[in-house]
Image: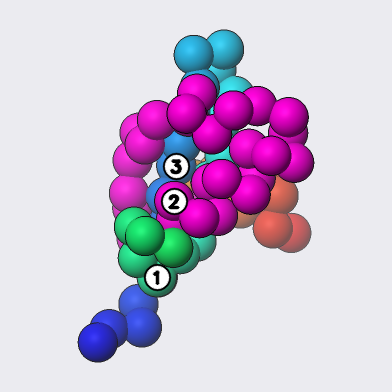
Amino acid sequence: MSNKKNYYSFEDTAGTTIEFQATSLQQAMVIKKNKALELGIPKEAFELVSIRKKPTQNEIAISE
């Protein structure tokens, strides 16, 4: 089993984007649920928009 992480990006219809690292799509769905709860937005509002190996510029800025 691979331990490589990908960056998963989800977006809702209002344009709110959440992006984070996870080892699998299943793990990403759990993290999405928790982040949506923190934001007070239903998890169903977020749709997967991308999976990538490297973070976007926004993610780099947040990480620093």
Cα distance between the residues tagged 2 and 3: 11 Å
Q: Where's the N terminus, which quadrant?
A: bottom left
Considering only vertical position in the picture, is 62 above or below 37?
A: below
Identify the residue position indicated by label 2 in the image. Answer: 29
Neighbour tally class for label 2: few under 14, some 14-19, many 20 plus, Cα within 10 Å: some
Q: Amino acid at mark 3?
A: Ser
Q: Is residue 60 visible?
A: yes
The magenta segment: 28-55
Tell me which numbered mark, 1 or 2, is placed earlier along the sequence. 1
Q: Magenta stretch: residue 32 in it?
A: yes
Q: Amino acid at mark 1?
A: Thr
Q: Nearer the viewer, residue 32 or 7?
A: 32
Q: Magenta stretch: residue 14 in it?
A: no
Question: For the point 57% across and 39% down, which residue is it?
Answer: 18
Identify the residue position indicated by label 3 in the image. Answer: 9
Question: For the point 54% across and 34% down, which residue is it?
Answer: 43
Tell me which numbered mark, 2 or 3, is placed earlier along the sequence. 3
Q: Nearer the viewer, residue 24 or 52?
A: 24
Cα distance between the residues tagged 1 and 2: 11 Å
Among the 4 quarters of the image, the one containing residue 35: top right
Identify the residue position indicated by label 1 in the image. Answer: 23
Q: Secondary structure at mark 2?
A: helix
Residue occupying the far bottom of the picture: 1
Q: Position of residue 10 (x, y in %)?
A: 46, 36
Neighbour tally class for label 1: few under 14, some 14-19, many 20 plus, Cα within 10 Å: some
Tell me which numbered mark, 3 or 1, is placed earlier along the sequence. 3
Q: Secondary structure at mark 3?
A: strand
Considering only vertical position in the picture, is 62 above or below 23?
A: above
Q: Position of residue 45 (x, y in %)?
A: 50, 23
Cα distance between the residues tagged 3 and 1: 13 Å
